[in-house]
Amino acid sequence: MSPAEVTLRELLRTVAEKHYHDEYELKIKSFHSGGANYTSELFSVTLTSKDKEDLRLFAKVAIVGDRMRELMNATKMFAIEGFFYNELVKTYEDLQDKHGVVGDDRCEIPKFYGCNSKIGEETVVLEDLAARGYYGYNRHKSLDWYHASSAIEELAKFHALSFAYQNERPEEFDRVMKYLWFTKPNSDEAVKDAYFPKLISQALKHIANENHRERVMKFMEIDGAEMYERFNRPFGHPVLIHGDYRTSNLFFKKKGEKLHTIPVDFQTVHTGCVVSDFIYFIFVGSDSSFRQEHLQTLIELYYETLCVSMKRLGVDCAEVYPRKEFDRELKEVLPYAVFLGIALLPVVLVEAENAPRVDGDSDVDNFLLAPNDLYVERFRGIVEDCIKLGAI
């Protein structure tokens, strides 16, 4: 039995008692995400008790080593996830209940069953969405309209809750906003002097067009950690954003003719601007041909859904977040796509067998991955699109 499973079993005992399972059996199975998750060991759990319906659960237990825990600010990251499920979800549920938001109009968060916040043993137990018929999306496959449009609508509903939170509980929102203010990863001199320069150099090798390569070089003159912080801070109206909104952190289920999306993994929720989540999702999850056909339509869909969702929650979108402010932020944050192409895309598209480790004595060099052909194609597409759009 792994140390992570031992930790999980302690928490599950509390979960079972809370749900009145005096006598129960546990079936616990560890599984891998196929390279989509690095910070936790994952488990599917079935809790069985006489005369009660089986409880199907999903759990993740932190497995980040000391070195990577420091560099990733992982302790704060896990604390944020605990805060999100223990406190922020309750606020969002209250807001939706107050305004009578139901059915497909409601932003749905996985049901939360408990967590362990002890440093080094951080654990979260949630409902098993797969047991409800939800499925994940192949992270190596470019987005299609069916999944992208559903995910964008869900993102807009999630952001609308932040606007409503600020509108109805401004003092409380201000405290939460300060707690969730983005802090850049801890970069010691070795990381600054070696990791980011290597990462940039590696990406530049795959830009065939000399003019494009020079533009990216000029854009990346700022230190990588500083740039990461720059694009994850509010450019205008501050909201609470997901921070890692990509297909690996979304579950989908067809309901009639409509596709329903539920986001997961809220370790990176922070104070930022809505377009950061939007650009992150689109450029990390799609290829150039998809963006050429659907980017502008998705921009319109996002903003329209945001305004409708805000109205349901009693907020005037045109007054609080007018279209011109959204367009300005979109223009300012669009270069973030290039940074994501350099710093994140290699990890997103890595083959499962080459996925980086963060446990034990792992170091940041584990994330210097040899780019595969899919990465080269996608990264070139990001650079070309950002140049066409005037971002760099």
Image (tube, helix red, strand yellow):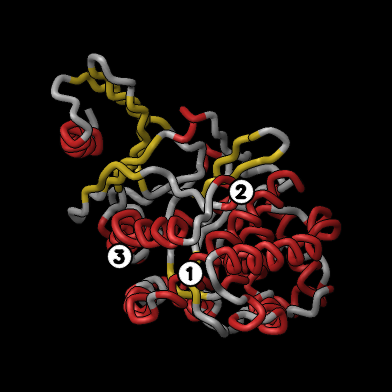
Mark 1 and mark 3: Cα distance apart in space: 21 Å
Residue at 42 percent across and 34 percent down: it is 128
Q: Crowdedness of circle 2 by 10 Å Cα count: few (<14), some, many (20+)?
A: many
Of marks 1 and 2, the one in the foreground: 1
Question: Which residue is the site of mark 1?
Answer: 162
**Label 1 amino acid?**
Ser
**Label 3 amino acid?**
Lys
Q: Nearer the viewer, residue 65 or 200?
A: 65
Q: Is residue 385 above or below residue 86?
A: below
Of marks 1 and 3, the one in the foreground: 1
Q: Secondary structure at mark 1?
A: helix
**Label 2 amino acid?**
Leu
Q: Crowdedness of circle 3 by 10 Å Cα count: few (<14), some, many (20+)?
A: some
Question: Which residue is the site of mark 3?
Answer: 76
Of marks 2 and 3, the one in the foreground: 3
Q: Crowdedness of circle 1 by 10 Å Cα count: few (<14), some, many (20+)?
A: many
- Decide: marks 1, 3 in contact (CB < 8 A)? no
Which sits earlier in the primary sequence, circle 1 or circle 3? 3
Q: Residue 99 in the image: state x and y as whole percent.
A: 49, 61
Residue at 29 percent across and 55 percent down: it is 86
Question: Which residue is the site of mark 2?
Answer: 349
Q: Residue 245 in the image: state x and y as whole percent.
A: 55, 57
Q: Nearer the viewer, residue 136 or 315?
A: 315
